[in-house]
Image (tube, rainbow, N blue to C red):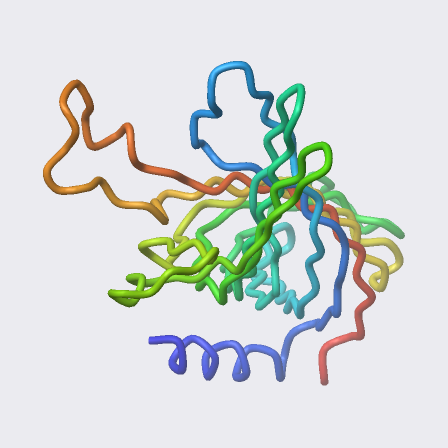
């Protein structure tokens, strides 16, 4: 499936405007923080390639492939947890121009599905006079091992993205986009602890991205 999507992107890119982009991600998860803790966004990086093909006077199709850092940051009065998850993410966005006539810059509203695959990550817990850290991996922890590493159930992060973009002089791209995960990277235990439901153990990514891109025109 992934190879089919890559071939699709390559065929489109031959006749589409191409952008290389990079920027910052501000992420958190839907996990309920412990009592007294405060959830904050963790800051990461994102970089990738985007293809922009005009479908009509005001409609554009914008597939892209990007590396995106997501994760979580939780603080208490004495402790801070920072967790960062690395994803390769493909998205297929439809963008609509909010302007009828050609301008030196174009404002777009965009949205569409995204398909992410987790590569792993790391975490660090810091408190006065003490800290611990480890890797974050996807899959089952090997039996009989003792480690500081954390294992998450699913590397898949299927979601929806929507936001705004501006293209200036057909070269400079400014993009502000919010992504909401629809698939959980944690699964409920079996059996469930008393007094809990499946939804108590599901965790989804939430990510705001701000990127800047530079493009070149499509081939004639």
Across and down, in percent, residue 101 comes to 77, 46
Q: Residue furthest left?
A: 191
Marks counted in the figure total 0
Nearest to the observer: residue 55 or residue 45: 45
Name the residue located 31 percent from the left edge and 62 percent from the top edge.
Answer: 141
Across and down, in percent, residue 75 comes to 63, 27
Q: Residue furthest top?
A: 36
Name the residue located 20 percent from the left edge and 23 percent from the top edge.
Answer: 196
Nearest to the observer: residue 80 or residue 9: 80
| Above or below: residue 28 compared with residue 83 | above
Nearest to the observer: residue 158 or residue 200: 200
Q: Seen in the image, is 219 located left or right of residue 178?
A: right
Q: Seen in the image, is 85 located left or right of residue 58?
A: left
Across and down, in percent, residue 177 comes to 64, 43
Q: Seen in the image, is 166 located left or right of residue 42?
A: right
Quadrant housing residue 62: bottom right
Q: Quadrant of the C terminus?
A: bottom right
Quadrant housing residue 5: bottom left
Quadrant housing residue 99: top right
Across and down, in percent, residue 109 comes to 63, 41
Name the residue located 62 percent from the left edge and 22 percent from the top edge.
Answer: 76
Q: Quadrant of the N terminus?
A: bottom left
């Amino acid at each position: 499936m992934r190879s089919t999507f890559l071939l699709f992107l390559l065929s489109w890119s031959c006749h589409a405007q191409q952008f290389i982009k990079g920027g910052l991600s501000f992420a958190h998860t839907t996990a309920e923080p412990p009592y007294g803790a405060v959830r904050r966004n963790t800051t990461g990086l994102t970089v990738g390639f985007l293809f922009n093909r005009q479908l009509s006077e005001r409609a554009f199709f914008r597939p892209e492939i990007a590396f995106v850092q997501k994760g979580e940051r939780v603080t208490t009065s004495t402790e801070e947890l920072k967790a960062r998850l690395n994803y390769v993410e493909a998205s297929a966005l439809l963008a609509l121009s909010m302007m009828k006539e050609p301008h030196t810059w174009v404002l777009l509203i965009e949205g569409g599905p995204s398909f992410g695959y987790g590569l792993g990550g790391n975490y660090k817990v810091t408190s006065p006079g003490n800290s611990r850290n480890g890797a974050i991996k996807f899959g089952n922890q090997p039996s009989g091992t003792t480690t500081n590493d954390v294992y998450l159930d699913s590397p898949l992060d299927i979601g929806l993205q929507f936001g705004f973009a501006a293209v200036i002089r057909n070269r400079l791209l400014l993009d502000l986009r919010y992504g909401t995960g629809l698939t959980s990277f944690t699964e409920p235990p079996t059996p469930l602890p008393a007094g809990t439901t499946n939804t108590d153990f599901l965790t989804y990514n939430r990510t705001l991205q701000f990127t800047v891109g530079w493009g070149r025109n499509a081939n004639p």
